Image (cartoon, rainbow, N blue to C red):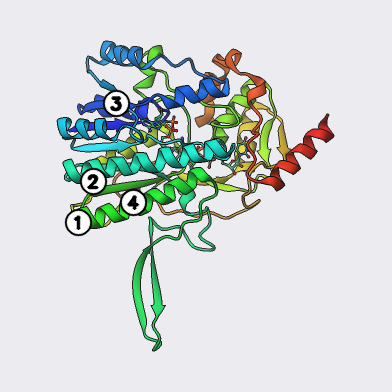
């Protein structure tokens, strides 16, 4: 297949591009390298020394004999060039990772909030317009997030995207409807994924586009079969307070002797998936497109759910790290139950990697190997969700001083 991977220089996009290429697909990576620019802006670097995109692609050619093309393009701002690319290449599938993906960064301040909405919503819309006008048979696979649901089914398992509801009319007669699961985003970033859902619903209905939206949980791990093949292929690994996600942060914290930073009680339950399963899921999704005219296919891309404190205990048991409870910079439920259906991926053949302490070994080893690159000042999560959280964090800083 001819596949465009938007955001193919990023944490999920790079290993996915390599995996799809290794499966014999013809892959073009499209990225504006904004993630690398944000690292520079924040004064932080990936834990792993990632090669520049040209060296990455050259390394892949060397080890696999396969070529990947790279196109430097901003999908939010260069709609005409995006159209030209779609017209010229006529992809069978496009995978859309190209968004600002960190919740804390999206809550950092007014300009980051505006940037996240402008970048993510415009990028997704530009892509949909390009497909609707120039390539309506292309299958769009988008990375959404569990966060659109708001992390609680209130007693029931979160279904895959849709909810069957019954509404009574003025005469008391029941009417059945299938609706998008009500969104309850917990950050400006998660809000953009909720807005994306509506864009997809409209373009599937109006232009019969074939769209799959993957509501993915928190990704952990770093390396995949392909990224391990050469040091120049190593994947990105974020550990800082803005972009680092919880389990990968805990593993780095353990490696450098920093206490594991549990926000609040750690009673937050979240869904997790290993990066190796991310790339596998994308492949499975590409191979099972909806038909033109069908509703958006929504799949929950997760392996399991755990509380943050259980994750911390898992890492502490394996490494001997201390656990510390820090004031939570986020406005989020202190505790929640979360049960999620991943029935479709299981039916497509996914047998997901589950977390146990042995599974952490590879990422712990990688964290230790690069521990000299860790900047301790970048570890604390500083972006607060609102004035109340800001006050709590400032008070706690004053007490600590
Ligand atoms: P990432 O930031 O590492 O990668 C995103 C890539 O997209 C970057 O290389 C960036 O330069 C590029 N990009 C951003 N805006 C662009 C634009 N306007 N034009 C072209 N390129 C642009 O993020 P990631 O962790 O790889 O996440 C990829 C996708 O998966 C995101 O949409 C994210 O919301 C979703 N996701 C990630 C996780 C996770 O834990 N990492 C979990 C669930 C969902
Ligand atoms: N947390 C801690 N300590 C830390 C970091 C985080 O306790 O040091 C807590 C947070 O308060 C939150 C939970 O861990 O309760 C998850 O935080 P996270 O940073 O790992 O994940 P999140 O901000 O939700 O975002 C990540 C990705 C995002 C993706 C999302 C999937 O950055 O792109 O969409 O996971 S999900 O969470 O399922 O919506």
Position above or below: 45 against 320: above
Report, in whole angstroms, how far the alpha carbon at label 1 lies from the one at label 2. 15 Å
Secondary structure category for the residue under label 1: loop
Q: Which mark is residue 293?
A: 1
Which quadrant of the rendered structure holds the N terminus?
A: top left
Of the pair 238 and 392, the residue shown nearer to us: 392
Disc 4 crowd rating (10 Å Cα; few below 14, some 14-19, many 20+) is: some
Q: Are marks 4 and 2 in contact (CB under 8 Å)?
A: no
* Residue under label 4: 199
- The answer to which of marks 1 and 2 sits earlier in the sequence is 2
What separation in Å lies between label 1 and label 3 (alpha carbons)?
Answer: 28 Å
Q: Is residue 20 above or below residue 293?
A: above
Residue 279, percent across and down? 35, 33
Depicted 329 relative to depicted 357: above or below: below
Q: Circle 1: is it few (<14), some (14-19), or many (20+) Cα within 10 Å?
A: some
Nearer mark to the viewer, of 3 and 2: 3
Q: Position of residue 65 (x, y in %)?
A: 22, 14
Residue 288's tag is 2
Q: Spatial distance from mark 1 to mark 4, Cα to Cα?
A: 15 Å
Quarter of the image that includes the C terminus: top right
Q: Residue at x 25, y 30 (%)?
A: 81
Q: Is mark 4 within 8 Å of ligand 1?
A: no
Q: Closer to the camera: disc 3 or disc 4?
A: 4
Q: Which residue is mark 3?
A: 29
- Determine the CA span between mark 4 and mark 2: 21 Å
Instruction: Choose the circle earlier in sequence order: 3 or 4.
Output: 3
> Cβ(mark 3) to ligand 1 < 8 Å?
no
Question: In this rendering, which labeled residue sits more in front, label 1 or label 4?
Answer: 4
């Amino acid at each position: 297949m001819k596949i465009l991977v938007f955001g193919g220089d990023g944490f999920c996009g790079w290993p996915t591009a390599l995996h799809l290429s290794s499966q014999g697909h013809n892959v073009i990576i499209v990225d504006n390298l904004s993630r690398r620019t944000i690292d520079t802006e924040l004064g932080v670097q990936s834990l792993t020394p990632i090669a520049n995109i040209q060296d990455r692609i050259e390394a892949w050619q060397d080890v696999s004999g396969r070529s990947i093309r790279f196109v430097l393009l901003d999908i939010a701002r260069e709609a005409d060039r995006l159209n030209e690319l779609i017209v010229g290449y006529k992809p069978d599938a496009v995978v859309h990772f190209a968004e600002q993906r960190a919740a804390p960064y999206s809550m950092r301040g007014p300009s980051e909030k505006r940037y996240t909405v402008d970048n993510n919503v415009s990028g997704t819309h530009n892509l949909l317009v390009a497909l609707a006008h120039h390539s309506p048979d292309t299958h769009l696979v988008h990375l959404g997030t569990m966060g659109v649901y708001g992390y609680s089914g209130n007693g029931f398992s979160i279904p895959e995207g849709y909810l069957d509801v019954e509404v009574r009319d003025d005469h008391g007669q029941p009417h059945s409807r299938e609706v998008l699961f009500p969104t309850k985003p917990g950050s400006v970033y998660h809000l953009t994924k909720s807005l994306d859902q509506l864009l997809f619903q409209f373009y599937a209905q109006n232009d019969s586009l074939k769209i799959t939206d993957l509501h993915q949980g928190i990704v952990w791990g770093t390396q995949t079969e392909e990224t391990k093949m050469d040091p120049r292929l190593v994947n990105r690994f974020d550990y800082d307070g803005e972009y680092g996600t919880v389990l990968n942060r805990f593993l780095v914290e353990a490696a450098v002797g920093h206490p594991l930073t549990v926000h609040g009680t750690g009673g937050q339950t979240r869904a997790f998936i290993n990066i190796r399963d991310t790339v596998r899921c994308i492949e499975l999704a590409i191979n099972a497109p909806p038909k033109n005219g069908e509703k958006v296919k929504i799949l929950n891309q997760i392996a399991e759910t755990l509380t943050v404190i259980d994750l911390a205990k898992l890492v502490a048991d394996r490494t001997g790290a201390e656990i510390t409870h820090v004031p939570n910079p986020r406005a989020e439920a202190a505790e929640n139950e979360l049960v999620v259906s991943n029935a479709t991926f299981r039916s497509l053949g996914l047998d997901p990697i589950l977390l146990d302490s042995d599974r952490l070994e590879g990422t712990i080893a990688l964290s230790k190997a690069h521990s000299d690159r860790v900047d301790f000042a970048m570890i604390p999560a500083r972006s607060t969700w609102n004035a109340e959280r800001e006050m709590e964090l400032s008070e706690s800083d004053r007490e600590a001083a």
